[in-house]
Amino acid sequence: MSKTFDVVVIGGGPAGYVAAIRAGQLGLAVACVEGWKNVKGELALGGTCLNVGCIPSKALLESSENYEKLQHKFADHGISVKGIELDVTRMQARKETVVGKMTKGIEFLFRKNKVTWLKGFAKFTGKAEGGFQIQVTGEAGVETVSAKNVIIATGSKARHLPNVPVDNTTVCDNEGALALPAVPKKLGVIGAGVIGLELGSVWRRLGAEVTILEALPTFLAGADEAVAKEALKSFTKQGLQISLGVKIGEVKQSKSGVVVAYTDAEGKAQKLECDKLIVSIGRVPNTDNLGLEAIGLKTNERGMIDVDGHCRTLLNGVYAIGDVVRGPMLAHKAEEEGMMAAELIAGQKGHVNYDAIPWVIYTYPEIAWVGKTEQQLKAEGVAYKMGSFPFAANGRAHGQGEPDGFVKVLADAKTDRILGVHVIHAHASEQIAEAVLAMEFMAASEDVARTSHAHPSLSEVMKEAMLAVEKRAIHN
């Protein structure tokens, strides 16, 4: 007789494991299906984010940034270092240690909240009385379980170029790019999005000559234009070679590396020769082989599952969250949807405010924003006020040797309600949290402007930018 659960979550990434833990906290009988294996061949929770995405990339970004500071920035502090050596093997081992701690932490949280981990891959086999039947295939064999409610949280995988095989040795997606055993002399990156910029930055800092090819004619089209302009200037100064408006042609792999034929923005034929190539042209949802047809569901033209504002599918009792549904493919957005789905199943009033989901790019400087960009407000015909303040006028930023960047605030012209906040700075990922909280509580720029901020701190720049909305910044 098959086991029956109140909730079965398919997928153990940020969307799935958060949904499972929250459901467990609420007293529901819950199982999470996950069959991911790490580089050691061990089953691991955490999905792409913890294993080959968010967490390992941040570990490498930190290591590479420290290496660059040691080479180029510590001398300004009176700290001279000779005989600097780079050990990529040890750096990669540290990254794997960080990942291991995080994934093992989720296992502990599963045990703490009585979440059953079904180790394998799930497929719907049909409807059952009062719910659904799910077949789980793993190393231990095949098991069928029943669920009154199902949360689909299977995440996404890297999109590949047609006719360009990814071996994750010479031609890499995010997985291979995070596991290079040595610094390539010349690195090519196709795609100037979040992943391309972050991973390109890692290997550039460690000594690679990095060229990034982007199909779009504008840089970081989703970011505020002022921030994108500042970022492009900074990245170019650092040595990243970024070509926009290109059209990728034939990609040939040889024993010596990769040759990428492309047409530049002016229509001229060009050729990029590199030792390694990273393909980072977006991601596609993992919705194949789920057996959705067995329960009467299907995907849309983008391979996603259609849901309403509360992540409910057309089938009562089936939810879909994270990268398999509409909206940005962001881990924290997925986590919020996981919380919401679990709480709705438990009869609570779960919700997600999609207008207050932050975006972050962990380059140097970091780029972060929440809400509307200035170009969006103009296109929508919304009357707004703008305030901006530079970190160059902040004492703490100078003390840390990080005076570049600014905070930009957009507020409604009549109500003063904050509509968007944009930050470019070394610590933008931390700075943006205050803006997200303000928008979640529908604050006006005046509310933040009249809130005391510690001195000296980087947070003062947020306050000054809010003051600047009414042209009354103090220190600029």
Image (cartoon, grey):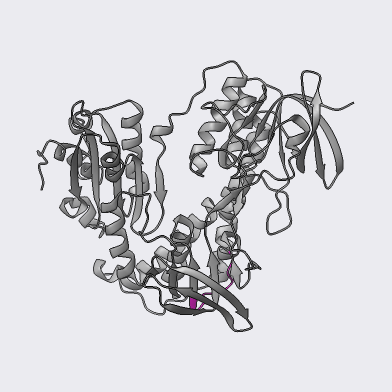
Q: Front-most of 187 and 37? A: 187
Question: Dividing the image into 4 quarters, which one contains the N terminus?
Answer: top right
Q: Position of residue 450 (x, y in %)?
A: 17, 30
Horizontally, residue 135 falls left or right of residue 466, namely right
> What residue sits 39% from the left and 33% below the top?
355
Residue at the far bottom: name it: 256
184 in magenta:
yes
Q: Quadrant of residue 62?
A: bottom left
Question: In this rendering, does residue 185 appear at all?
Answer: no
Q: Main secondary structure of the magenta part?
A: loop
Question: On the picture, is 246 further left or further right than 100?
Answer: left
For the residue pair 306 and 329, the one nearer the viewer reads as 306
Q: Is residue 358 visible?
A: yes
Front residue of 64/135: it is: 135
Q: Is residue 382 above or below residue 258?
A: above
The percent coordinates of residue 434 (x first, y second) are 32, 36
Query: Residue 334: image x %, image y %?
Result: 53, 38
Highlighted range, magenta: 179-186
Q: Is residue 203 magenta?
A: no
What residue occupies the far right of the structure in this picture? 1
How many numbered marks, from 0 up? Answer: 0
| 409 vs 162: above or below | above
- Give residue 2's quadrant in the image: top right
Q: Position of residue 331 (x, y in %)?
A: 52, 43
Query: Outermost residue toward the front?
Result: 267
Residue depicted at 41% across the width and 54% down the height: 362
Above or below, 251 against 373 in this view is below
